[in-house]
Amino acid sequence: MNIKTLTQILILFSSLSILSIGGGNTVLPEMHHKAVDGYHWLTDKQFADVFAISQAAPGPSVLIVTIIGYKAAGFPGAILATIAMMLPAGVLVYLVSRVWERAKDMPLRKAIERGLAPLTVGLILASGWVMSKAADHDWRAFLLTGVCTAIFSTTKINPLFLVAAAGFIGWLGWV
Amino acid sequence: MSEKPTLAALALTFNHIALASFGGGLSAWSREVIVVEKQWMEDEEFLSAVTMCRILPGANQVNLAVFVGVKFHGVPGAVAAVFGLTLVPVVIALALAYFYFQFHHLPAVQGILKGAAAAAVALTLSMVVKTGRKCLTGVVPVALFAAIFLMNGIARWPLLACLALLAPLAVAWAWPKKS
């Protein structure tokens, strides 16, 4: 086991955890800089591929750090990177959520809940937009997205079924 | 609201959410399960929690698991929810990492991922439709919604800048009126 690499993993990802304001993807440029140019854990192309895999794999997309940790230091590296990326930010959320629970009947909390709702819906639309740009969608993929959106919005179909069907269409090479 | 879930139920539910999100769209899945299916939260509480989890550092979905876990069971609840959310996905990520570093380019795999990604974006868009129906009910909320989409989605301004500008307006608009 390589103690030096594990220490680097611990320091890098726990500091990225605290810096990742706005979500895990906001620190990707910094993660790329350190993991590729700084420590040479993986190549530029590998970083891009690993990013795509982590986006498509189930679970939080921040699990890109699991794969980078695995490449850098094997299984222990993967586990350490994952914990380092989640723990510091998680502790902060814990502290904030306790304050939030106590403020249950305050007008401020009511105003924040009601006021932030339209902003959140706008942000969700923005992330849908950014995701389809990142996936480099052409008109056929947009058409598939449009059809799926209509089905999701108007029926109670199990989404997993539709995602599998879309994956099958992709396998056939139609998108 | 339905009754308080057990620790095991928290872990299993977040595991279910995580596994359903193959191809992405994890927030949409979270709402589908937490608000619609389990009824652990109302839409408004859920949406404000989602935004707070976006503002705070850390992966949004991990933060949301902490938030929901703490709401019901404090620290053990948070640990159970995060464990449920990440355990199986970490195993899958490791398997994919192994597979990837063994066989780099497989067109079939890339095709499947492309199709699944299109459906994942659709799931996110349908969440906009479903939650928008409830809260985009006047000129002010629609303007707030459109403004933050243009700033963050199209112009790619940093999230904090967008919220620093719009959140005070939104909170002032939503302040409960004394009657």
Image: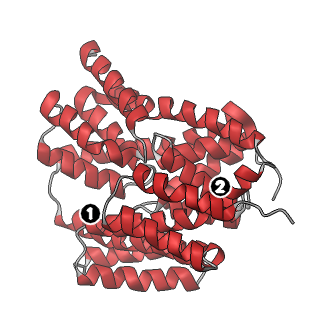
Residue A22 in picture, x, y percent from top left:
43, 47
Judge the density around disc 2: few (<14), some (14-19), many (≥20) Cα neighbours within 10 Å: many
Residue A112's label in the rendered image is 2
Q: Nearer the viewer, mark 1 or mark 2?
A: 2
Q: What SS does tag 1 mark?
A: helix
Residue type at mark 1 is Ala
For disc 1, the chain is A
Can you name the residue that lies furthest to the top here?
A: A3
Q: Is residue A153 left or right of residue A40?
A: right
Q: Is residue A144 visible?
A: yes
The quarter holding residue A169 reads bottom left
Residue B115 in picture, x, y percent from top left:
32, 73
The quarter holding residue B112 reads bottom left
Residue highlighted by disc 1: A134
For marks 1 and 2 on the same chain, the one whose residue lies earlier in the sequence: 2
Q: Is residue A165 above or below residue B73?
A: below
Residue type at mark 2 is Ile
In front here: A79 or A99?
A: A99
- Marks 1 and 2, how far apart at CA: 31 Å
